[in-house]
Amino acid sequence: MKLSVSGRASAAAVVAAVTLLATGSIAGAAPAPTAGAAAAAPDIPVANVKAHLAQLQSIATANGGNRAHGRAGYLASVNYVKGKLDAAGFTTTVQQFTSSGSTGYNLIADWPGGNTDQVVMAGSHLDSVTAGPGINDNGSGSAAVLETALAVARSGYKPTKHLRFAWWGAEELGMVGSRSYVNGLSTANRAKISGYLNFDMIGSPNPGYFVYDDDPTIEKTFKDYFTGLGIATEPETEGDGRSDHAPFKNAGVPVGGLFSGADYKKTSAQAAKWGGTVGVAFDRCYHASCDTSANINDTALDRNSDAIAYAMWALSS
């Protein structure tokens, strides 16, 4: 979730580094898409999502303790995600923009195939604040979106609609990367996006289960998934307009997404529904140095990761 911060890095060094993006690897070669690929969404292994979080933590630790815009840890995060996607067969693009005097990066990954006049997008911001490594905010969303994309490749899924995944830079400065992306689209290309799904903080340690209520179809898709688990949800209001769905929504694109809570405190009614601790913030480490790999609720991360896959399959098939 955004917070205005500042940071500088040598633009020349950053641009030079982007030419050395790691190729990465995934366990096992991704199968080629087949005509008989099942339409049912796969389970997203939470262990895989947590492995990505461990890598993001390591990146932050090796780069001054954060993964913020304009800092080396952010570009290293882009390199890590891009390497995994390239190895899995995605077509990736790194887009540059400038904010607060530093070069920023969005990473866009397209899965080959599907009707490119009907695009279903999933995205998350990859940057942290300067105060800490940003593992819940927003390593959690970034890792889950990455693992969902890799599940697409592993399953050989052939969607009817075109699938696109995105990792945004400089969200913490005011959704700068996502706004740059949306503003750079032609009117025709914006109209081709049938839905943008945003995932910002989905593993909060004292979690709630919040669903964006901006678009009825997308909202129902997520609510159906949680109903199947016997979990009540609430409309997402705490972060409304504070994350990367906002530029899409403002441009007329249908949006939706999930959220497990930030610095608001859990009420007794919410604890009765979801468990956890009354009167304690959903994430006590929000925008703090303690937002580390220890600051994750595995159950919430698992459920929300599976919900991402459920929605992407349902909305694209």
Image (cartoon, grey):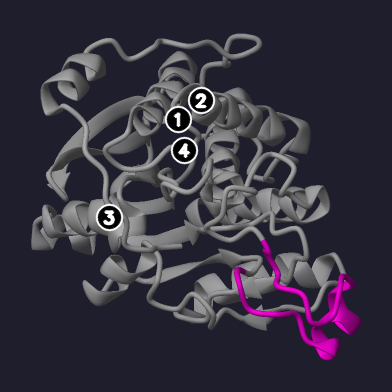
In the rendered structure, which amino acid carries the disc numbered 3?
Answer: Ser
Residue to which mark 3 is pinned: 178
Residue to which mark 2 is pinned: 59
The mark lying in front, picked from 1 and 4, is: 1
| Residue 4, position as x, y percentages in the image | 31, 62
- The Cα–Cα distance between marks 4 and 2, rounded to whole angstroms, is 8 Å
The magenta span reads 262-284
- The Cα–Cα distance between marks 1 and 4, rounded to whole angstroms, is 6 Å
The mark lying in front, picked from 3 and 2, is: 2
- The Cα–Cα distance between marks 1 and 3, rounded to whole angstroms, is 25 Å
Residue to which mark 4 is pinned: 66
Residue to which mark 1 is pinned: 64
Which residue lies at the image location 86% right of the left edge and 80% below the top edge?
271
Q: Are marks 4 and 2 in contact (CB under 8 Å)?
A: no
Q: Of residues 25 and 34, which is closer to you in this image?
A: 25
Q: Quadrant of residue 300?
A: bottom right
